[in-house]
Amino acid sequence: MKAIVLNGTGGPGNLILAEIPIPSIKENEVLIATKAISINPVDAAATRMPELLNYVYQIKGDEKQIVLGWDVAGVVTAAGTAVTRFKTGDEVFGMVKFPGQANGYAEYVAAPEGELVLKPRNISFNEAAGATLAALTAWQSLVTNGNVKKGDKVVITGASGGVGHYAVQIAKYFGAYVIAVASAANKDFVLSLGADEFIDYKTQSFEDHIQDADIVHDAVWSDDVHHVQRSLKAIKSGGKLLSLIVDLDEDMQQKLKAKEVAGMRVYVQANRDDLQTIADLLERGAIKTYVSATFPLEQTTKAHGLIQTKNAVGKIIVTV
Ligand SMILES: NC(=O)c1ccc[n+]([C@@H]2O[C@H](COP(=O)([O-])OP(=O)(O)OC[C@H]3O[C@@H](n4cnc5c(N)ncnc54)[C@H](OP(=O)(O)O)[C@@H]3O)[C@@H](O)[C@H]2O)c1
């Protein structure tokens, strides 16, 4: 089968089209004929940073090749002996073996049934593939950790990106008042997702305008600790800071305590119940995946180049 092999760290130029064997499945796994794969910042970072690659791919030292990719949608072509929920022909999607060796950039992927749900019939494979790591992150940040509720004032930074565009829709679904932070070019896009207010981060500082947020979902692709400190300024006492990128160190913990704000560092986790909820919301049209660009498998390098700009809008999808 065709796959995109990572020929060492150094950047997206090391993603090479190759022929590798179709994976075998374990008893609790299904074999998926891949239709669509979504690309995330972590994929791009893994092509550059050996430590991150080791973590997300869980390198053991005996790999024949390294194939990135965790977010897949496709059709089940075989099921292991212990599989009970899926059969050949089912259309499924999920975030597979993250972190781990999912080998998602390939024509076939072996996936545990517990990490998959059925794709709603009324959405495309591209839309389903997008609603995996990014949608799970937005859900687990705002709902699992943030306990977002009706009337909450919620600031969402990175609102036009993969995670952010789901976060805006999820917060609105719960009846929150949403302030979306993005660049001016994406103002209409984030307002079309339901955001109540827009702040252009290139000309305004959101913390100068908002100091009474119940929740800030901080998803700016930067490990600059100052960004979470700015987020803290925007939150009222008793509120919550959800940090997707920056660890909240001792200094930050003290600042949070002084202001009586709960701070949480969010790490996305596979969770079939969460994914099923996302599938249900997609099916009902309560949330949508916005796909801004698609590339064929052979052009995965271009997809990485686009996510690496840090200005992706919605989701970038590789089709198979
Ligand atoms: N902790 C976790 O488990 C977890 C999970 C998923 C993602 N993440 C992290 O979350 C971040 C966002 O992921 P993503 O998939 O949404 O990325 P993405 O699709 O690449 O989106 C990036 C977004 O960030 C915006 N942006 C860039 N610089 C900004 C700034 N200075 N202020 C405000 N917005 C800015 C861009 O908006 P404009 O184009 O409008 O500038 C763009 O929409 C990444 O760092 C990713 O690694 C963490």
Image (cartoon, rainbow, N blue to C red):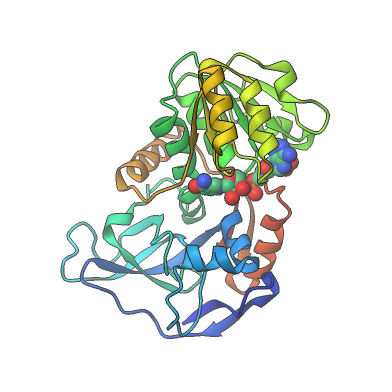
Depth order, front residue of 106/119: 106
**Percent position (x, y) of residue 178?**
58, 22
Q: Residue at x 29, y 67 (%)?
A: 30
Observer-nearest of 311 and 221:
221
In which image quadrant can residue 16 be found?
Answer: bottom right
90 on left or right of 250 = left
Tell me which residue sits at (40%, 36%) in the image.
281
Residue 200 placed where, x, y %?
A: 76, 29
- Taking the image in four quarters, ligand 1 sits in the one at top right
Residue depicted at x 52% and y 23%: 257
Percent position of residue 81, x then y: 16, 71
User: x and y percent of residue 28 in the render?
Assistant: 22, 66
To which quarter of the image does residue 136 belong? Answer: top left
Name the residue rendered at 55%, 25% in the picture: 256
- Of 216 and 316, which appears nearest the observer? 216
On the question of residue 173 being in view, the answer is yes
Q: Is residue 265 left or right of residue 231?
A: left
- Compared to 246, does 67 lie above or below? below
- Residue 191 visible: no
Q: Quadrant of residue 41?
A: bottom right
**Residue 319 position (above or below residue 284):** below
